[in-house]
Amino acid sequence: MSRIRTFALQEAPEPAPVQPPKDGPAPDADEDVAEPLPAPPLTLALARKGSSYILVHPAPMSASAPNERQYAIINALVQADPFPELGEGGRSRLWLKIGAGKSGEQGGENEGLLEKLVAAGVVKETGTTAKQGIVDYPLVELLLPSHELCHACACCGAFETQKEEDDVPTRFLRCARCKQAYYCSALCQSKDWKATHKPNCLDVPGDDDASIEEARRRALLRLFGRTVAARVGPRSKMD
Ligand SMILES: [Zn+2]
Ligand SMILES: [Zn+2]
């Protein structure tokens, strides 16, 4: 079984300290004005949990906090098109979650994330954006194959890990029928089957990423009360 792909996201350096105005008091000569150091790169993996794409730490940060893996949710559910059609070669596409700050401005949520993910080879831009509220969400295509993503257990929510833990295997097994639900243990699979999965588990005949991804997309659309036909059908004016 292949390993989870990890990548380094280079964090932007801290903003330079504000300089006193020219006619203000002269800076204290003894005070060392240190240049801000660039933050070390952050090694992350991309995880899938339900309808979310989440940047996670590849392994628990500390033994005392085995579940603190989540770094940031990176996809937005754009109302008009929450689960975009697959791209070229059946690649998944998602609306990248960015904040209201203008491009290049400080302070927006996930500021600079698009550039960082493109540089790390995780996504590529499609040139399409969707406006929702005051934000233009860019549509990006995922470059990682499914087997290099980090999957979450559909029952308990634990993430796959690069490091062996006491009772959690590094890679999970997936439901053989729908090929979309992953489980950390047989116990979690059995619990989830009884609680939620049974009516939602539909046979996916293909074993390739594109077939599985399209089945997942349709399942999510159904879950959100939409049908593919209604979404791509001709637009009719509401009278
Ligand atoms: Zn589990
Ligand atoms: Zn299933």
Image (cartoon, rainbow, N blue to C red):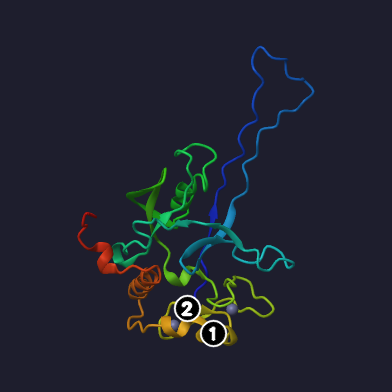
* Label 1: which secondary element: helix
Q: Is residue 203 above or below residue 161?
A: below
Dot 2 alpha-carbon crowd within 10 angstroms: few under 14, some 14 to 19, many 20 or more? many
The percent position of residue 177, horizontal first and vertical second, equals: 41, 85
Identify residue for label 2.
Answer: 181
Q: Is residue 223 left or right of residue 149?
A: left
- Residue 145: mark: none
Q: Is residue 54 above or below residue 184?
A: above
Identify residue for label 1.
Answer: 189
Mark 2 Cβ and ligand 2 under 8 Å apart = yes
Q: Is residue 236 above or below residue 167?
A: above
Dot 1 alpha-carbon crowd within 10 angstroms: few under 14, some 14 to 19, many 20 or more? many
The percent position of residue 206, horizontal first and vertical second, equals: 33, 81
**Of residues 4 and 154, which is closer to you in this image?**
154
The percent position of residue 231, horizontal first and vertical second, equals: 28, 63
Q: Is residue 62 above or below residue 238?
A: below
Q: Are marks 2 and 1 in contact (CB under 8 Å)?
A: yes
Task: Inspect the image, locate mark 1, and give the three-letter code of the amino acid beneath it.
Answer: Gln
Residue 70 placement: quadrant: bottom right
Residue at 63 percent of width and 45 percent of height: 39
The percent position of residue 218, horizontal first and vertical second, equals: 34, 72
* Label 2: which secondary element: loop
Q: In terms of image quarters, where does ligand 1 lie?
A: bottom right
**Of residues 40 and 186, which is closer to you in this image?**
186
Q: Is residue 194 left or right of residue 35?
A: left
**Sequence-wise first label, 2 or 1:** 2
